[in-house]
Image (spheres, coloured by chain):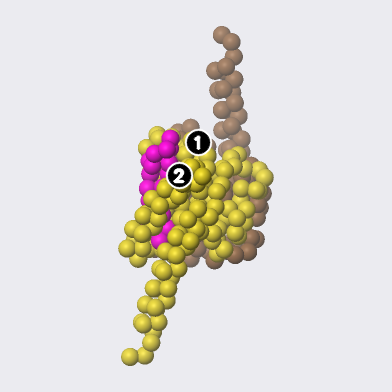
Chain colours: A brown, B yellow
Amino acid sequence: MKVIIMHENFMLEAIKEAEKAFAIDEVPIGCVIVYHNKIIARAHNLRESKQSAIAHAEILAIEKACNIIGSWRLEDCTLYVTLEPCPMCSGAIIQSRMKTVVFGAYDPKGGCIESCMKMYETPGFNHYPETIGGILEEECGALLKQFFRQKRKQKKANTSPK
Amino acid sequence: MKVIIMHENFMLEAIKEAEKAFAIDEVPIGCVIVYHNKIIARAHNLRESKQSAIAHAEILAIEKACNIIGSWRLEDCTLYVTLEPCPMCSGAIIQSRMKTVVFGAYDPKGGCIESCMKMYETPGFNHYPETIGGILEEECGALLKQFFRQKRKQKKANTSPK
């Protein structure tokens, strides 16, 4: 029970990051990385702002955490992210030797931990993180649904005859 | 035949990048990205130098190419890399909507195009690049073998009794 509350508290911080993305018209995905019970890196999706294919929340947070720790090995860290990681980010979690990854909403359109593929059940890699899915799933998913609903409305308004 | 020579020429440029990595004691992997028959980005593995888990040749090259093109979409680009991409880099290729990926040596210890997994045969993603493997395979692999042979020798020299 205590562990679940801890996970929820850190996920709430990841949601705050996702809200920052929402506010600047980015797909609302947020991430924090925790080391010895303390957040050492925070980031949100910046793909459009940076016009960079790799500027996902997880990649930006891993880059910051490596900087803070002074090592590419994040062996004692836990990554919290509001959406199930895509193939690139699931792979970056392997590359950083992340101990644990905790995600909120499941992503049937690209999630690589449970949904599209179970990357961490593929033999042959040199690291396999522990995973926990569905922490504050509803809250994380609601933010994304709200974003895409708004986008569809904007698109409709822009294409409807005047 | 003409196409193969073109691929080999660009792979030779990726090998030059890999050699730069070798010279600074990084695992020798190099990458170039080509747009309209011209190299727009070059990079080599800098994981140890930067102490960053994401500083693989492909990620660094994709970041540069996005900067040059001014877009996260690299739809008309081809990525050349000396070693079959890992899960992170194979995923980054999807995320950047890269048209084609050409690699040199196959990687049984982590390659995600053919060896450990066939990522691009997994249904559900929003993009699938064309792939060509084994271009200058021997030359690309020889550089890696030489690097690890040297590493083992150094390790042996450091641990042997004086």
Q: Position of residue A35 (x, y in %)?
A: 46, 62
Residue B112 seen anywhere in this rendered image of the structure: yes
Judging depth in this view, the residue of B110 and A14 nearest the camera is: B110
Residue occupying image coordinates x 33% and y 58%: B20
Quickly name the residue at label 2. Answer: B6
Residue range (magenta): B28-47
Q: Are marks 2 and 1 on the same chain?
A: yes
Query: Badge 2: how crowded within 10 Å, few (<14), some, or many (20+)?
Result: few
Q: Is the N terminus of chain A in the top left, top right, bottom left or bottom right quadrant?
A: bottom right
Q: Position of residue A63 (x, y in %)?
A: 41, 53
2 or 1: tag closer to the N-terminus: 2
| Residue A71, picture quadrant | bottom left
Q: What separation in Å lies between label 2 and label 1 (alpha carbons)?
A: 19 Å
Mark 2 is on which residue type? Met
Q: Position of residue A52 (x, y in %)?
A: 44, 40
Judging depth in this view, the residue of A21 and B90 nearest the camera is: B90
Residue occupying image coordinates x 50% and y 58%: B137
Judging depth in this view, the residue of A47 and A2 nearest the camera is: A47
Residue B59 seen anywhere in this rendered image of the structure: no
Image: A27 above or below B148: above
Query: Badge 1: how crowded within 10 Å, few (<14), some, or many (20+)?
Result: some
Q: Position of residue B44 (x, y in %)?
A: 38, 54
> Is A113 positioned to the left or the right of B7 in the image?
right
Quickly name the residue at label 1. Answer: B75
Image: A139 above or below B117: above
Q: Are marks 2 and 1 in contact (CB under 8 Å)?
A: no
